[in-house]
Image: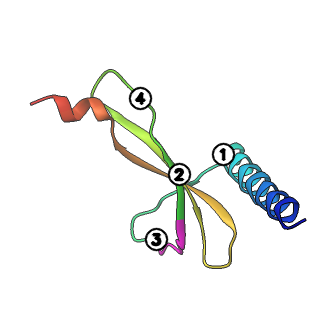
Amino acid sequence: MKTRTLFATALAVLSLSASLTTLAHSAEATPYRYGQNLDIAKVISIDVPNRPQCEVVTAKMTYRNSAGDVEILGYEQLSSACANQN
C-alpha cells in the first residue's frame, strides 16, 4: 500500500513539474530592461539559441519567483560561437 501511494505521489509531482515547464516554454518572454529588479527564487532553465557565427542572440531564462509563479525573461547575450574566436 505504501509503495502505491509513494509511486502515485511521485508520478503526480513529475507530471505537475513537466506541465509547468511546458507552460512556461510556450509563454512569451518578458524582455529584460537594464536596472530591472528581478524576483528569482529558482532558475528552472536557460535556453540559448545555437548559432554558427558570433552574434548577439536572445536567450530565455525560465524561473520561479518568490510567490511560486513561473516566469520567462528574455535577455541578449553573445552566442557560444564567440567563445571560439579571438
Residue designated by label 1: 25
Q: Which residues are magenta?
A: 36-42
Pointers 2 and 1 in contact (C-beta within 8 Å): yes
Per the rendering, the mark at residue 50 is 4
Which is the main secondary structure of the residues drawn in magenta? Answer: loop
- Left/right placement of residue 55 relative to residue 35 reads left
Q: Residue at x 80, y 64 (%)?
A: 6
Point out residue 23 in the picture as x, y percentages from the top left corner. 74, 49
Q: Tag 3: Cα neighbours inside 10 Å, few (<14), some, or many (≥20)?
A: few
Residue designated by label 2: 45
Dot 2: element = strand
Give amino acid for label 1.
His
Q: Is residue 40 magenta?
A: yes
- Quadrant containing the C terminus is top left
- Location of residue 64 by image quarter: bottom right
The residue at the far top in this view is: 52
Point out residue 48 in the picture as x, y percentages from the top left corner. 44, 39
Sequence order check: which comes first, mark 2 or mark 1?
A: 1
